[in-house]
Structures are given as structure tokens and as C-alpha cells.
Amino acid sequence: MKNLKSLKNTNLFTSHRKLHISIFIISSFLTSSILIYNYVINSPLTDFPTIKIVTNGNPEYEKYVNATFELKSKKLSEEVPSIDARVRLRGSGSGWNKMSPKKGYRIELTDQISLLGMRKDDDWLLFELYSDYPKTRTKLSMDLWRSLSSTNPTAILPDSKFVCVYINGDFKGLYLLAEKNDRTLFGLDDYQNNINSSLIFQAKGEKNIVPYDRTAWEQDWPNIDESYLIMDEILTELSYFIEHSSNEEFFDSNNSIYTKFYKENLIDYYIFNYFIYHQDCWNHNYFIVRDSYPSKFYLIPWDFDISFGQYLWKELDERFYLEYDIRYLNRLYDRLLGNKSFKEDLKIRWFELRNSIWSSENILNMLDEMYDEIGDVLSSEVNLWNMRSPILFREERVNDIEESIDFLYDWIEERLEFCDYYFSDMGNE
């Protein structure tokens, strides 16, 4: 078997693609860094979907403020005239989320409407993309997971569209407008006042699923204001089974882990997060979802700040093995990865995807399409937030967009090759 540490991509197709993107980005900067940047600060980008929000007070992390919401688009059918709304900041308001000068937003509209062709709803998210240097990792992650839905009905994440945003007349740059992870998105039944209810539990604290710790979880559905807390009983029982069941009970019995979770979901969740190097999804930043019992649980990945080998200015080796960390952080996958049959299933599924929707060309084409869409606004976005970054880390943080994009294309090609070798060895121990 070829030494994984020696893998290095030399694909000429990738070199040609990188050259195309580099020329595109350089020309974008040369022609627009001054003219478009000065223009965009004072007026909308007429060829790009633009959201204007005017607030009555400053949005906070846990408190909505009244606002108006308006969407402008070159397609008149997509425009939304000014309507009443409520706005708050996304996130917990702690750690990096608090330090970041660019904020994400939660929006509640007074009416359920479709935005840019997405589903009708009144609850929307604006991802700020500040820690996403190439500006495409979050959307690429969500779209890649959604691409699995043709063979895995549990591969659900929000649809999303790039937009420019103004808050109280101040240009805030490029954002990702997305649907919300909720009962509607997952197609769940109405709640029941018992443990058979449909549910959405969010893993937020950095704790292993075993043992269960209530402080690390939130019950997103059923809404506790309308129902009651079912999370403690369900997750305590699930945690106990994962930790204390025998191998026969865990894998082979009529009450095995595959009667509790959809097997295809457990397989795809591992493959997807391993490939994109999603470090944060093994002990937090994921959802456990279930429709009304006897439906099974399934896992939904979330929060892609650390993915595709990048986090802010940090670049991560595409050849990182990762499995040891996963087994340490997540007892469920520790047990699954100790089973030869499960690893053989991972291998089969990986190469099924690589020979179809996850070919190198398909994935890189997804990326090409995103840069074709946002290329005209990249220089304005990067110039704006390089300038507004805190002095404390401005020199280290400055985003070289060409370097970030170049790194992303290289990393994907090399990570795919690395994963080909990694999964080819699955089940051979």
C-alpha cells in the first residue's frame, strides 16, 4: 500500500483549473478593488441579491429587535418589498463568536415567504462567512451533504444562497442566506406529549455522547414552551445502550444499534465528515433527529467553520488520519469502527460515491459554479473585512483570497486521494 504521508497531487486538470481561478480573481481585484469597493459602500450591487435590514435598536444574541426586511434582486420575481421582521445575532455570544467583528443574524419575518427560490418560511439564517476565508466552505459542505439525499433520505441540510447585506445602511459584505434546521426542514410530525414524539436534539457542548450530560444538549423540538422535556429520558437510555451493551447486543440482536439509528445515516455521516475534515462534529455541532416512534434516529452535521483544511488563517494537512481522534471523542463511532462489517460498509459506500456524485470533477465543478456566482463581490468583501479586523490580530488575519481559494482546490484533490487510500484499507485489518 502506498505511503499515505507521501501522497501529492499532480493532476494537470487541477493545475489548469487553479490557473483559471487565479486569473479570474486577479482580474477581479485589478478592475474592481477601487471602483466597486467605493461603489458598494454607498449603494447596492445591482447584479447581486441584496438584503437591506433596518433595525429599531441593536440586535443582541438572546434578544430580538424589531426591524424591516427588504430583498433586492436583478430578477424582479425574487424581490421582496419592505416587510416587518425581528432580528437577533446568531450564536451563543461567547468565544470566537463574540470576538468576530462580523456577525451572523437570525431573522423572523411576519409572513412565510420564499426567498430566492427557497422554501416558504418566516425563519431565516444569515451566515457571516468571516472565518470562511475562501467564502465557499460553508455552502459547499451543506450542498455536498444534500447531494447524498438521492440514496440517503436522511441527508438533509438547509438550502442556501449568497447575498450581500446592509444593516441600517452600512454595507456588511457577503453572507449566506439559509433556511433553518427545524421541524419543517426535516418533515417531522407534530409533537406528542410523550417520549414517542418527533424530536430534534442539538449537541452544543464539547462532551462525548457517553455519558449523557444535559448541559451539553438542547431540545430544539418539541418546543419546551409548548410541550415538555423528553431529552433526558431518551438520551440517558441511548447513552447507556451505547456504553454498556455487549457486542452481540450492539450489532446483532433484534435491538441492535441499527434498530435505533438508520444504518445508511451512520455510514454517510462518518464518510462525509471524515472527507471534509470536519473536526467539530464528533462531540458537538450536530443534531440527533427522529420522526415519531417507531422511526429511527439520524445524525445531521452542523457548523462548518473548521472544514476543508481551513479555519481562519490556519491551514490543515489534507493527509491527517483523524480516526484516532474520532474514536476518542465519540463513543458511538468508537464502537462502530471496532466492527469489521461496518468498516467494510464504509469502504463500499465511499467508492460508490467516488464513482458517481463525488468524483473529483463533480465536486470541483460545484466550487467553480460558486466562484462564478460570487466573483464580482469577493474583492469588496475581503477589502472590507481586512480593514475592519481587530488591530490585535489584523496582520495575522488578513485574508489573501487568491491563496485561500488556491489552497482549497489543492486540498480537495489531495484529500480525495488520501481518502481513497484510507477507505480502500477498511475491513482489511
Image (cartoon, helix red, strand yellow):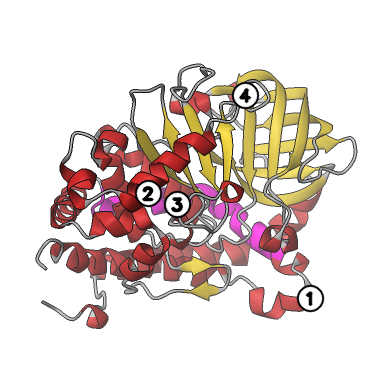
Is residue 341 visible in the rendered image? The answer is: yes
Residue 384 colored in magenta in the image: yes
Q: Nearer the viewer, residue 341 or 33?
A: 341
Residue 203, given in percent of the width and then of the height, sits at 52, 47
Find residue 227 and name its label. none
In space, the residues marked 4 and 1 are separated at their CA atoms by 41 Å
- Quick one: label 4, few (<14), some, or many (20+) residues within 10 Å? few
Q: Earlier in the sequence, mark 4 or mark 3?
A: 4
For image coordinates 49% across by 35% down, the residue present is 233
For disc 3, the marked residue is 209
Find residue 76 and name its label. 4
Above or below, 211 against 34 in this view is: above
Q: Secondary structure at mark 1?
A: helix
| Mark 3 residue type | Ile
Is residue 356 visible in the rendered image? The answer is: no
In this picture, which residue range is highlighted in magenta? Answer: 358-385
| Label 2–label 3 contact, CB within 8 A | no
Q: Earlier in the sequence, mark 2 or mark 3?
A: 3
For disc 1, the marked residue is 391
Q: Is residue 426 left or right of residue 231?
A: left
Q: Nearer the viewer, mark 4 or mark 1?
A: 1
Q: Secondary structure at mark 3?
A: loop
Q: Is residue 187 left or right of residue 311?
A: left
- Quick one: label 1, few (<14), some, or many (20+) residues within 10 Å? few
Q: Earlier in the sequence, mark 3 or mark 1?
A: 3
For disc 2, the marked residue is 366
- Which residue ends up furthest to the right in the rendered image? 57
